[in-house]
Image (tube, helix red, strand yellow):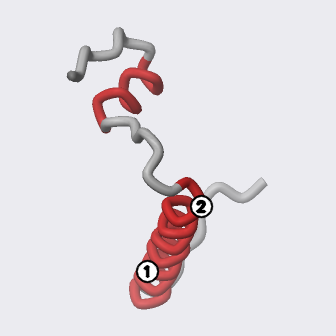
Amino acid sequence: MPVAAIVPMEEFEALEEAADELLARKALQTLAEEGDGPRATLAQVLADIFGTPKPDVA
């Protein structure tokens, strides 16, 4: 299974931009679908990822 590829920086940067655009579109779609429901803070997401206690946010 390949683990790396050598590509020109211009192509790499274009791929990064395309991925960023796709993620931004998906985020906007999710926000539109969910409406004004509660959101998680970055601290809460990081706590979930790293298994640390969630901070109390009022």
Q: Earlier in the sequence, mark 1 or mark 2?
A: 1
* Total number of numbered discs in the rendering: 2
Query: Which corner quadrant of the image does residue 2 belong to?
Result: bottom right
Q: Amino acid at mark 1?
A: Glu
Dividing the image into 4 quarters, which one contains the C terminus?
top left
Checking the image for residue 33, the label placed there is 2
Q: Could you say where residue 41 lies in the image, as x and y percent from the top left?
A: 32, 36
Q: In front: 32, or 43?
A: 32
In the displayed orientation, state which residue is furthest to the top.
53
Q: Vertically, is 19 above or below 43? A: below
Q: Give amino acid for label 2.
A: Glu
Q: CA distance from mark 1 to mark 2?
A: 24 Å
In the image, is 18 to the left or to the right of 42? right
* Residue that protrudes farthest toward the front in the picture: 36
Q: Nearer the viewer, residue 35 or 8?
A: 35
Residue 12 or residue 22, whichever sits in front: 22
**Where 21 falls versus 28 (above or below)?**
below
Residue 40 appears in which quarter of the rendering? top left
- Residue 17 badge: 1
